[in-house]
Image: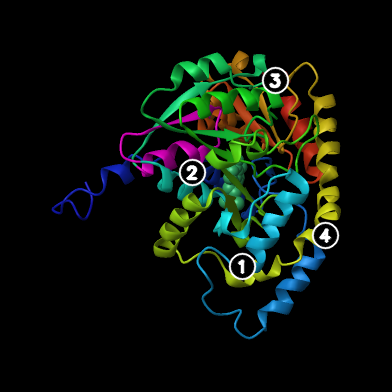
Amino acid sequence: MSYVSNFKPLSSKALSIEPSATLKVSAKTKELKSRGVDVINMTAGESDLLPPRWLLENLKLYSSKPGVNLYKPTAGIPELREEIARKYQKYNGINYTKDEVIITIGGKHAIYLALAALCNDGDEVIVISPYWVSYVEQVKIVGAKPVILETDSRNGFIPDINKLRELVNAKTKAIIVNSPNNPTGAVYPAQVLKGIFEIAYTNGVYVISDEIYENFVYEGDFISFASIDEKAKNMTIVINGFSKSHSVTGWRIGYACANKEIINLMDSIQSHISSGTSSLVQYAFLGFLDHYEEDVKSLSVFKERRDYIANELKGICSYIPSGAFYYFIDVSKFYNGDIKNSVDFCEKLLDKKLLSLVPGVAFGDDRYVRLSFACSMETIKEGIKRLKEFFEGL
Ligand code: PLP
């Protein structure tokens, strides 16, 4: 079947991994765009805003400083680890020290390192569906088994604590929590986080809390999982990063906070896999706390976009996201002979209206499609117009 057919088979673990569906769709859309086709791209998982000016200036400044070009400690430069710890003290009420922080190649790699530090072959990791595409595949890569807890828009995509309790057993090693959530935009209320904490704590299960959309909350308050109880800090690996908040998805910088033992293990793995992320990018972020409030404020345009879409899609989409920058829209009532699933829906939409969305099947729920509002208001207006026309024609 391949040019190496007379050799031994490739890794069955690797062959069981699905390539990132969201990146695939957005690559196809970018390719159409590069050919001059008038496609409206609402697939993006990245902000359209420019990185803050102070950050670009820092990048330039540090690029010529002696020594910045060289290898740095694999867990990250101490000054930035320290500053991230101070951010948690000041804004999240959690007392991390710099040794409880690791800087990684984006939030994605932080999640992988956390899973690799926690899991043995055969362990189970509970993933709440709809889920961000990489959780399930990363759990498989580390030899564990993803166990899915389903939610849907009728209960605001909030997990049912009793159902969670039923899924936990002796093999459960961790629960992945993602609030604000990609793809649904759900922000879990305090009592739900506490419910998850109680179950995890009583069963000796870790929580990987992916908080990368911390700064994108429109309703309710953001609560870091590690802050909900004195004991939560010790059993939680908080994942965060600058990709979304500072519009630097391509720079590849994220971080994790956890107890020292877990951070040391993650560092040990990172030291062999990549030696950590770019030294220059880390230096550029020094001083980020001085600009934090102003940078977060600049994200308020996302609320305006969310509200505009809520108004335009009245009657089409009753679930309004409280956070992140996505609408997860139930389109299953339009499934018929021609459109049987979310992939068909997105393909037809792209064909007929040149509007690109991500099929919900990529996030574990084929009834939905994901629409990103991380794009200009002009793009949103045109995209929503095309989507409404498409719905009318169905
Ligand atoms: N976690 C969630 C929920 C995400 O949506 C993303 C990116 O789309 C990430 C983590 C990874 O972010 P990064 O680009 O920092 O690796």
Place residue 195 in its image quadrant. Answer: top right
- Rate crowding at label 4 as few (under 14), some (14 to 19) or many (20 or more) other CA atoms within 10 Å: few
Q: Which residues are magenta?
A: 120-142
- Rate crowding at label 3 as few (under 14), some (14 to 19) or many (20 or more) other CA atoms within 10 Å: few
**Residue marked by disc 2:** 20
Place residue 79 in its image quadrant. Answer: bottom right
Which tag, 3 or 1, sits closer to the chain's start? 1
Whole-percent x and y of residue 181? 64, 34
| Colouring rule applied to residues | rainbow
**Residue marked by disc 3:** 393
Q: What residue is drawn where x is 72% and y is 21%? A: 319
Q: In the rendered image, is residue 31 in sight?
A: no
User: Rounded to the nearest whole Å, what is the CA distance between mark 3 and mark 4?
Assistant: 48 Å
Q: Nearer the viewer, residue 349 or 55?
A: 55
Whole-percent x and y of residue 176? 53, 34
Q: Nearer the viewer, residue 370 or 183?
A: 183
**Residue marked by disc 1:** 78
Q: Are marks 2 and 4 in contact (CB under 8 Å)?
A: no
Identified by mark 4, the residue type is: His
Identified by mark 3, the residue type is: Gly
Q: Nearer the viewer, residue 271 or 316?
A: 271
Identify the disc placed on residue 291. 4
Identified by mark 2, the residue type is: Ser
Q: Is residue 297 magenta?
A: no
User: Rounded to the nearest whole Å, what is the CA distance between mark 2 and mark 4?
Assistant: 33 Å
Q: Are marks 3 and 1 in contact (CB under 8 Å)?
A: no
Identified by mark 1, the residue type is: Pro
Whole-percent x and y of residue 352? 64, 32
* Element assignment for label 1: helix
* Element assignment for label 3: helix
Which tag, 2 or 4, sits closer to the chain's start? 2
Q: Nearer the viewer, residue 33 or 87?
A: 87
